[in-house]
Image (cartoon, helix red, strand yellow):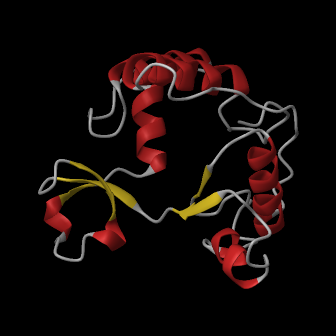
Amino acid sequence: MLLGKLKSGDIPAPVRDAAIRKMVELYFPPNSAMVTGYGFDMLYAGPREAVLHAYFRQNMGATHFIIGRDHAGVGDYYGAFDAQSIFDEEVPEGALEIEIFNADHTAWSKKLGKVVMMREAPDHTKEDFVLLSGTKVREMLSEGIAPPEEFSRPEVARILMDYYRSTK
């Protein structure tokens, strides 16, 4: 993860670190993940910064990198999925050894009992999903309300609730 400066409102590195470490400690098989970071300030430079992040992670030994909606973006300056398309349109084949996974809108599938990319569940209707916006989750956390377990492990939610409540 990035350990440098972020924009106002982003979760600080020590809180993200604690949440990730707790999840790995409790839910990952032993010796299956390494939690680490690099001291680089977030630039909010959109697609090109996503490529930089991929190289950093690759150089630190990561094998996979998830690029979500609006990765490294700010406001609506870049398109929501520009940071994904740069890997297909501008990064030459074989230039990276890390596998890029393009994340779309995620939701809990009531049918499948797990989190899915909504695009990968074409047989679902809106009622088949449990949906929460990031804004709603942040509101819940700041009010001391844990999101449904489908969205966050309880122990991780506790760390985030403690953080958000400390900012009030």
> 144 or 54: which is nearer to us?
54
State the image coordinates of residue 118 (x, y, percent, origin top left): 33, 67
- What residue lies at 38% left-to-right and 24% top-to-bottom? 27
What count of labels does the image hold? 0
- What residue lies at 61% left-to-right and 60% top-to-bottom? 99
> 142 or 36: which is nearer to us?
36
Whether residue 158 is situated above or below residue 1 in the rendered picture: above
Side of 99 relative to 58 (left or right): left
State the image coordinates of residue 47 (x, y, percent, origin top left): 76, 68
Task: Point out the image quarter for the N terminus.
Answer: top right
Side of 77 relative to 143 (left or right): right
Q: Is residue 161 visible?
A: no
State the image coordinates of residue 102 (x, y, percent, origin top left): 54, 65
Residue 128: image quadrant is bottom left
State the image coordinates of residue 13 (x, y, percent, origin top left): 71, 27
Side of 137 relative to 64 (left or right): left
> 151 or 9: which is nearer to us?
151
Whether residue 94 is situated above or below residue 110 in the rendered picture: below
> 40 or 127: which is nearer to us?
40
Whether residue 41 is situated above or below residue 87 in the rendered picture: above
Whether residue 110 is situated above or below residue 153 in the rendered picture: below
Q: Is residue 66 visible?
A: yes
- What residue lies at 34% left-to-right and 39% top-to-bottom? 151
Task: Point out the image quarter for the C terminus.
Answer: top right
